[in-house]
């Protein structure tokens, strides 16, 4: 069988010795893991408080859907902006800008009570949060060779599930002790601490004094290219860009729906409240964490065994897509924990699928174009999420059932993989003119 032009690097016995000599790249991965976790804590505070605030201030389902809609609109626009910003200023400065914007907006939630007020606050928060993954993926491209990148993305992307696990525990505690406003303020302060660590410590590999020559050699085992500008029109004429755009547009709406509506699902279907829907949410996101790491590990392991790059990524995505399918029956689960099992599997599948799809831009594009491609994918995912928010608000306001939402989720990943494969049957390096 003919191999892809891109194959795994750094997996020989000699290179294996090199891998074992260095650890700085994994410290970078841990730092990214924590900011992703904090991002999802901040993002989940409102979702956890939704049933409580809806009761206190008489929110309507369409009103809450508007909050989600405009957050994702800002998120999508910001993704494109930050994709460009990160390509120009780098991961460190771009990350600092993004975290500063979203943290200020997050803490400002304590100043409003209506869905209209939350909508206005969520717009700058969406703009800031949109910069996280362009920066994180840029840092991964700087610090990890292609053979390890999907695994590294899977590891730090698992922070999203840790954040989603922590939020249902700490938000009720803070709310019951000091009021819901303090839930936004105290969680925002945690992100301020991370920002100080990022600004103090993060560097590019060649600027990090404590990195070993062996590890630097391993990190730079892929071809190195200087940063240069790339036109949007050139990217949009590339098949690989559209594979990533359409893949994100199909799977991101499912994840956004889980994030915004899972607490509400358990409140409506099983009559759980702020005090007791924490354990089901924690179980779901623990499963998602496992899926994130295993999805990235699976394709990296296949690469190390000599599997061509496109086959390794797509086989991993296929397995993840199949794991999601049983979620179609979640609304009809007779017990809370039956629903938890089905939704947890779906979240695990999503995260594993995402780890491999997120690797596509850095797999095939030059490093200097990765941020821009990631930005376009983020915009498409947000647009899909906006449509899904309106759909979910309409379904819940008229039918009162999550079944149509879960049915869409069950097939979205297989369809996304099919689209990616039809557009890009094999991963080939994209040649962009200067």
Image: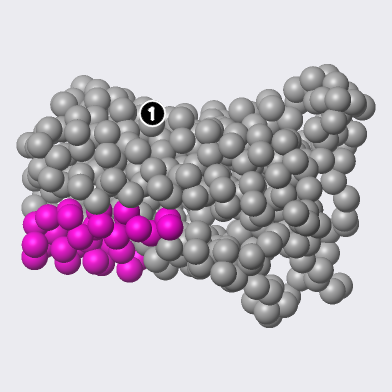
Q: What segment carries the magenta color?
A: 386-414
Q: Residue at x 59, y 70 (%)?
A: 423
Residue 74: say if magenta: no
Query: Residue 154 placed where, x, y %?
Result: 56, 38
Residue situated in front as seen by the camera: 193 or 295: 295
Judge left or right: residue 272 versus residue 147: left
Magenta-span inclusion, residue 388: yes
User: Mark 1 falls on what kind of element?
Assistant: helix
Q: Quadrant of residue 310?
A: bottom right
Can residue 277 be seen at all in this image of the molecule?
Answer: no
Q: Badge 1: few (under 14), some or many (20 or more) residues near its Cα, within 10 Å?
A: many
Left or right position of 39 against 29:
left
Q: Residue at x 12, y 55 (%)?
A: 401
Rendered position, 426 above or below 148 = below
* Residue at horizontal 68 percent and vertical 31 percent from the top: 28
Horizontal side, residue 182 vs residue 384: left or right: left
Q: Position of residue 40 (x, y in %)?
A: 42, 40
Corner quadrant of residue 225: bottom right
Circle 1 residue: 286
Give the vertical position of 196 relative to 408 (above or below).
above
Quarter occupied by residue 238: bottom right
Q: How many marks?
A: 1
The quadrant of the rendering that contains the N terminus is bottom right
Q: Quarter holding the C terminus?
A: bottom right
What residue occupies the far front of the structure in this picture? 1
Assign the magenta stretch its main secondary structure.
helix
Given residues 231 and 402, the one toward you in this image is 402
Using the image, determine if residue 141 lies above or below residue 191. below
């Amino acid at each position: 069988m003919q191999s892809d032009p891109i194959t795994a690097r750094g997996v020989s016995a000699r290179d294996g010795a090199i891998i074992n000599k260095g650890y700085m790249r994994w410290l970078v991965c841990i730092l990214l893991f924590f900011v992703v976790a904090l991002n999802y804590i901040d993002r989940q505070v409102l979702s956890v408080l939704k049933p409580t605030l809806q009761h206190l201030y008489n929110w309507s389902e369409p009103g809450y859907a508007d909050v989600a809609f405009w957050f994702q609109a800002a998120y999508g626009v910001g993704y494109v902006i930050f994709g460009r910003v990160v390509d120009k200023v780098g991961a460190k400065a771009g990350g600092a800008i993004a975290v500063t914007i979203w943290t200020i907006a997050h803490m400002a939630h304590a100043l409003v009570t209506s869905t209209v007020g939350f909508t206005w606050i969520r717009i700058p928060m969406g703009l800031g949060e949109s910069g996280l993954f362009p920066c994180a993926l840029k840092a991964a491209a700087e610090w990890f060779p292609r053979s390890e990148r999907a695994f590294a993305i899977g590891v730090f992307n698992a922070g999203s599930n840790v954040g989603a696990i922590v939020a249902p525990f700490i938000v009720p505690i803070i709310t019951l002790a000091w009021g819901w406003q303090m839930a936004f303020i105290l969680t925002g302060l945690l992100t301020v601490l991370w920002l100080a660590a990022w600004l103090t410590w993060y560097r590019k590999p060649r600027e990090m004094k404590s990195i070993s020559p062996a590890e630097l050699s391993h990190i730079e085992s892929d071809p190195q290219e200087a940063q240069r500008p790339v036109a949007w029109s050139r990217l949009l004429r590339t098949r690989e860009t559209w594979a990533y755009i359409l893949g994100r547009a199909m799977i991101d709406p499912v994840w956004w729906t889980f994030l915004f509506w899972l607490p509400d699902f358990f409140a409506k279907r099983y009559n759980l409240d702020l005090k007791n829907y924490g354990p089901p949410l924690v179980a779901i996101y623990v499963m998602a964490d496992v899926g994130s790491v295993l999805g990235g590990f699976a394709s990296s392991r296949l690469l190390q065994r000599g599997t061509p790059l496109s086959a390794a990524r797509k086989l991993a995505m296929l397995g993840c897509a199949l794991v999601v399918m049983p979620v179609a029956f979640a609304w009809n689960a007779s017990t809370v924990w039956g629903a938890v099992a089905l939704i947890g599997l779906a979240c695990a599948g999503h995260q594993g699928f995402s780890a491999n799809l997120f690797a596509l831009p850095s797999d095939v594009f030059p490093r200097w174009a990765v941020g821009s491609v990631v930005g376009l994918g983020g915009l498409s995912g947000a647009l899909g999420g906006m449509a899904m928010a309106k759909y979910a608000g309409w379904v819940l306001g008229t039918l009162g059932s999550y079944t149509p939402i879960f049915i869409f989720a069950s097939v979205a990943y297989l369809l996304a993989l099919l689209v990616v494969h039809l557009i890009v049957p094999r991963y080939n390096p994209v040649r962009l003119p200067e």
